[in-house]
Amino acid sequence: SSETRYSSLGLVKSRLILAMGEYQEPLLSRVEPCTKAKRSAEVQTPLQAVVSYLDAAFTVTERGSSVSQEIRAGLVTWVTMSYIVVVNPIILSARFADGSSPISFHAACRATCLSAAFASGFVGLAANLPFGLAAGMGLNSYLRYGIIDRLGLGPEGALAACFVQAVLFAFLAASGAVDKVQGALPSALKSSITVAIGVFQAFVGLQLMGLIVKSDTTLVALGDLSQPNLWLAFTATLLVAGLLIRKVTGALLLGICFTAAASYLLGLPNPNQDPSAGLSAGTDLSAKLFDLDFTPMLEKPQEFGTAVLCLLFIVVFDTAGVQHGIGQQAGLLDGRGFLPGAKYGYLGSAFGSGLGAVMGTSPVIIHNESAAGVQEGGRTGLCAMTTAVLFLLSPVLVPVIELIPPEATAPCLVLVGSMMMGPVKDIDFGDLRIALPAFLTICITPLAYSISFGIFVGIASYYVLGCVLWLAEVASVGGKAVQPSFLAISGDDDELIPEVP
């Protein structure tokens, strides 16, 4: 009946109310969220708070890394790049015939360290990328012997050319022109740039070992196998390779420390400790700025313009190639093959070059030795910030840097170079349209000892070959206008050069 049904429902309802009255929430769920956050903050030590802040600021965990790993990677990057603190001032301070130096060793050392610290720090903060920047090898020789001596611009005029180059590069980077040039290249050609940088880096490492030496007859030759430095570096290479295979934390840094310690204990010669070079003089921290001389822009426009354009060409292609190659190695490229924050990498190079010109050094680029830090686990700007702090301290650390022999960093360069061979699988060597430009890029970069020239030859050959195939296609259709598809910038770049019908 209806009365019975209503009474049953009332009984159920009263039992539910009674049960709800007796129910108590678990203790943890009754703690207010703000209270839990306060307790968590109270439990944290100052060191843990700093680590948490750095983790959040640089998105370390999101990129699969840790704060300690990033700092260690930054240390490895600095160690592998530290030679520039000594070598760059030696080149720039090379004396004239009358015994005077165009740029003093003290000034060049300060400029090298401070411009590297500023540029690396800028890239770490603005782009959150694990790149180390410093004055580029090759550029310093061109500045000292090509611009100052051959073009006759003098030290102040040569540094003014470096400053103008930095301004132009900053404009190209800010306007997106550099990214558009990079976007016009097929992914396979970009992969060949990564491989070329790896081969070049390994070639440099083999030279530092002494396994490959200069030859007047064959240009390069096998080194003296009786040299203990060579066998020490080769042994260290195998040791570090074993540590990497076993996934030992800090393998590259351990290899550098092992080689440096073994070299010292065995009493092997260290060219960095040549007392005649006066390297420790870099500890002089007094400030000096150069008075840039822009009068050659009007008095010697051809020489000044040649210097600016050559510097700009080298810096643009060198920076773009290394940035993409190491970004690919770190797994930081997006779905379209672009590196997020790349514009700030270019701007870091430009701003560092401008500061370096005012202080007395050659243009700043992203060093390919950054690949060593990436291999150690660097994935964020915290790695670059660590490198920047160490460069800031480098003027007073020159005596310590001198203790690191060249063969100590050679194993890192060789091993990282071998690991950069992976993208070669993305190159279709069965298609000569892309195989030839890729092959030229990979071969010419180490043989010409120039990353920028290798990239230029690869890009030029790609577009020249594309024009030839386009003309052949136009001729085959009876002279009708055909859109040159290889000039199109598209997300799908597998077929930028048309098939020949």
Image (cartoon, grey):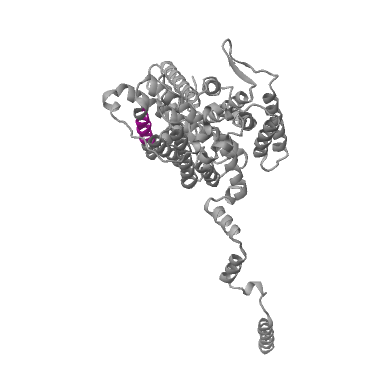
As drawn, which residue projects farthest toward the left? 298
Residue at position x 56%, y 56% in the image: 50
Q: Magenta region, mostly helix, strand or loop?
A: helix
Q: Nearer the viewer, residue 21 or 57?
A: 57
Q: Quadrant of residue 387?
A: top right
Q: Quadrant of the N terminus?
A: bottom right
> Height in image: 273 above or below 284?
above
Q: Residue at x 41, y 21 (%)?
A: 146
In the rendered image, residue 167, in percent from the top left (x then y), is placed at 36, 36
Q: Is residue 334 visible?
A: no
Residue furthest top in the image: 217
Q: Total number of numbered labels?
A: 0
Taking 160 as reference, is 343 left or right? Answer: right
- Magenta range is 158-169
Q: Residue 392 lies in magenta, yes or no?
A: no
68, 279: nearer the viewer: 279
Q: Is residue 471 above or below residue 39?
A: above
**Residue at position x 55%, y 51% from top?**
59
| Quarter of the view holding residue 5 | bottom right
| In magenta segment, residue 164 | yes
Q: Position of residue 43 (x, y in %)?
A: 62, 65
Residue 314 location (% of width, % of height): 44, 27
Residue 148 in view? yes
Percent x, y of residue 195: 57, 28
